[in-house]
Image (cartoon, rainbow, N blue to C red):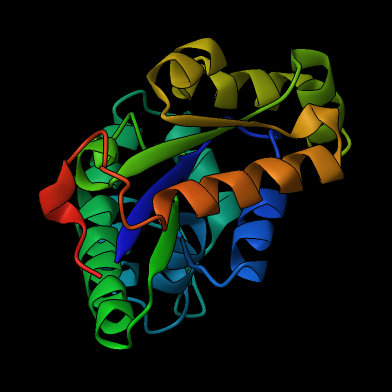
């Protein structure tokens, strides 16, 4: 099974792009969805996050608004939260991918916003970076309910700059050129990585277990 890591800064069009990969038969594993499950009632992160950040658990689930407030009060808080959540996310991802591999899935796309920042790029066959012009990115993000310029800037500070992501990518998809152009790029990538002669630029031919 081929593993593609898909990443990109906020507002670049990752969700739209993953849908295009899914339309072509890939399974998509989404890091944000995994975190939502961990924060939901019964989720494995509820207990430890509640202990680390008193008051953020409401009705048996992590209240993301309260958690965001707690994170904003302490510059070390993000590291403490990541130390709790990242191992749980990794465990869930490994289980999901093993199930997909057993089912005979040929292509899995891992939608991980902080792929490079967390070192996840070392565990995939290739990295796809989704990008767009900064003006388009800002327009998309600031149109979201409750989003402010200050919050947007705070998110960008925690993410690797787009230019650096593109420089480290194996494939780049520019969603700013329209949906059809992006779909063409997705189709081209799928054709390349599923070609039996393709060799992973990150893990070599030995990783291609089909």
Percent of width and height locating residue 110: 42, 55
Considering every residue shown, the one lying at the far front of the view is 197
Percent of width and height locating residue 40: 47, 75
Q: Is residue 187 left or right of residue 207?
A: right
Percent of width and height locating residue 36: 49, 66
In the rendered view, would you say 167 is above or below 49? above
Marks counted in the figure total 0
Considering every residue shown, the one lying at the far left of the view is 206
Q: In this view of the protein, can residue 148 be seen by the observer?
A: no
Percent of width and height locating residue 8: 55, 33
Q: Is residue 168 left or right of residue 90?
A: right
Picture residue at 60% right of the left edge, 59% below the top: 21
In the rendered view, would you say 203 is above or below 157? below
Q: Nearer the viewer, residue 36 or 42?
A: 36
Quadrant of image for the N terminus: bottom left
Picture residue at 21% right of the left edge, 46% below the top: 123
Q: Is residue 147 left or right of residue 122?
A: right
Picture residue at 60% right of the left edge, 67% below the top: 22
Picture residue at 33% right of the left edge, 29% below the top: 117
Q: In this view of the protein, can residue 196 be seen by the observer?
A: yes
Quadrant of image for the C terminus: bottom left
């Amino acid at each position: 099974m081929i593993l593609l890591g898909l990443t990109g800064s906020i507002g670049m069009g990752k969700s739209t792009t993953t849908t295009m990969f899914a339309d072509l038969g890939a399974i998509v594993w989404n890091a944000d969805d995994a975190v939502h499950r961990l924060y939901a009632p019964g989720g494995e992160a509820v207990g430890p996050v509640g202990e680390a950040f008193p008051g953020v658990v409401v009705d048996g689930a992590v209240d993301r608004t309260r958690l965001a407030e707690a994170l904003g009060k302490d510059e070390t808080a993000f590291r403490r939260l990541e130390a709790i959540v990242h191992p749980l996310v990794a465990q869930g991802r490994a289980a999901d991918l093993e199930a997909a591999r057993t089912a005979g899935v040929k292509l899995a796309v891992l939608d991980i916003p902080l792929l490079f920042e967390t070192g996840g790029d070392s565990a995939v066959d290739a990295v796809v970076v989704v990008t767009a012009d900064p003006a388009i990115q800002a327009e998309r993000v600031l149109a979201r309910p409750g989003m402010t310029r200050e919050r947007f800037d705070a998110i960008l500070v925690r993410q690797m700059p787009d230019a650096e992501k593109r420089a480290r990518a194996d494939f780049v998809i520019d969603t700013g050129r329209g949906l059809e152009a992006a779909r063409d790029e997705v189709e081209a990538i799928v054709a390349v990585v599923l070609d039996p002669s393709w060799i992973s630029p990150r893990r070599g031919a030995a990783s291609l277990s089909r």
